[in-house]
Amino acid sequence: MSEAKVKTTPPREQKHCRKEGCKRPYRAKGYCNVHYRQWRRGELGKKQRYKICSKEGCRKPMVRWGLCQEHFEADQKGAAAPAAG
C-alpha cells in the first residue's frame, strides 16, 4: 500500500516568467528566454549570477578574499613589497 507522490508544482508548460508584468512561458531560473539572457549577462536585478569582486566598478567573478584574480594578485604583490625606510 504505497502512496503515490502528488506533485505540488505546476508542470513547466503552465509556469510563466517571474519578472513582473511578463507573460512569456518559463525557461530557466524562473525566467522566460528574454529575461533569462538578461539575468545571465548580469543586467537583471541586483542578485548576481556569481559572487563578484568587491573593488569599485569591477564585475569579474570573485576568486579569494572578495577579490577577482586580477585584484587579488595586485593585492598580494603590494603586500609582498618591502617597506620603504
Image (cartoon, helix red, strand yellow):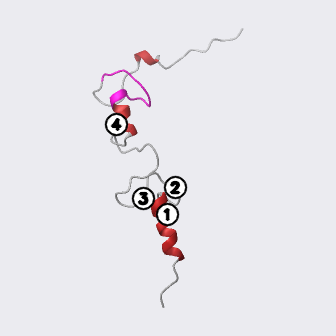
Mark found first going from the N terminus, 4 or 2: 4
Image mark count: 4
- Magenta: main secondary structure equals loop
CA gap between label 1 and label 3 equals 11 Å
Label 2 Cα crowd, 10 Å radius (few <14 / some 14-19 / many 20+): some
Q: Cβ–Cβ below 8 Å for labels 4 and 2?
A: no
Q: Cβ–Cβ below 8 Å for labels 2 and 3?
A: no
User: What residue lies at 48% left-to-right and 91% top-to-bottom?
Assistant: 85
Instruction: Please name which of the two marks, 1 or 3, marks the residue nearer to the observer.
Output: 1
Identify residue type, mark 1.
Phe
Mark 3 sits on what residue?
Answer: 54
User: What residue lies at 37% left-to-right and 41% top-to-bottom?
Assistant: 41
CA gap between label 2 and label 1 equals 8 Å
Mark 4 sits on what residue?
Answer: 38
Mark 1 sits on what residue?
Answer: 72
SS at mark 2 in the image? loop
Instruction: Please name which of the two marks, 4 or 3, marks the residue nearer to the observer.
Output: 4
Query: Of all residues shown, which one is farthest toward the bottom?
Result: 85
Label 1 Cα crowd, 10 Å radius (few <14 / some 14-19 / many 20+): some
Query: Of all residues shown, which one is farthest toward the right?
Result: 1
Mark 2 sits on what residue?
Answer: 63
Is residue 85 shown above or below 5?
A: below
Left or right? Give the position of 74 relative to 41. Answer: right
Q: Which residues are magenta?
A: 23-34
